[in-house]
Amino acid sequence: MKFIGINGSPRKNMNTAKLMKSALDGIESCGLKTKLYNLYDLNYKGCYSCFACKRENSGSYGRCVINDDLKPIFEEIDTADGLLVGSPVYYGDVTGQMRAFLERLMFQYMLYTKPPKTLRKKRLKIGLIYTMNIDETLLNKVL
Ligand SMILES: Cc1cc2nc3c(=O)[nH]c(=O)nc-3n(C[C@H](O)[C@H](O)[C@H](O)COP(=O)(O)O)c2cc1C
């Protein structure tokens, strides 16, 4: 079994990365293989809305056709058993790089059905790690 970690923080040794490394170490201690990617090391953009992944009976059905640094990672995720996604909170959301990654990852599998269905064949266990540093006084104001 294989778990892929995706770090959406620009800082490779700070809060998000530390938690992710610890989680991946835990996963490895259970006998699973892991691999960590840092999104800020990669060249890619968000979804181009080309709809090639929606063309039935084509080689690209269910697959993102953009040939950039995400291509080999998507191939790995395709056969992976788990995905650990980590991101700092930037303005109440994931980082821009993480957002672009998720657009590309999810849209290729998504079907326009009600209820929505997926073209992904294998179930993927998902772990999420978010870090933030809002202080307690501010947190009490927004809650
Ligand atoms: C551009 C930017 C936006 C941020 N927005 C928020 C926010 O909305 N809420 C919050 O609590 N922290 C915010 N933070 C703080 C980070 O989420 C926090 O420091 C995080 O743990 C950093 O993760 P890292 O060490 O992996 O880079 C922001 C930081 C930056 C640089």
Image (cartoon, grey):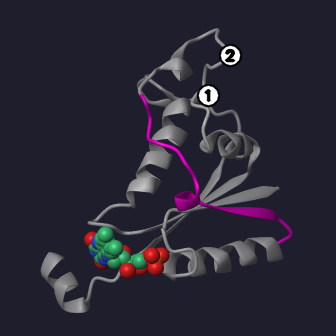
Q: Is 33 positioned to the left or the right of 95 in the image?
A: right
The answer to whether residue 47 is magenta is yes
Disc 2 target residue? 59
| Gap between marks 2 and 1 measured at Cα | 8 Å
The residue under label 2 is which amino acid type?
Gly
Q: Is 124 positioned to the left or the right of 102 in the image?
A: right
Q: Check the image and name the residue furthest to the top.
A: 57
Report helix, strand or loop for mark 1. loop
The residue under label 1 is which amino acid type?
Arg
Height in image: 53 above or below 103? above
Q: Can you give x and y, in whole percent of width and height, for residue 4 in the image?
A: 69, 58
Asked whether mark 2 lies closer than 8 Å to ligand 1, one says no
Residue neighbourhood size for the residue with mark 2, other residues' Cα within 10 Å, grouped as few (<14), some (14–19), many (≥20):
few
Residues marked 2 and 1 touching at CB (< 8 Å): yes
Disc 1 target residue? 63
Q: In which quarter of the image is the N terminus?
A: bottom right
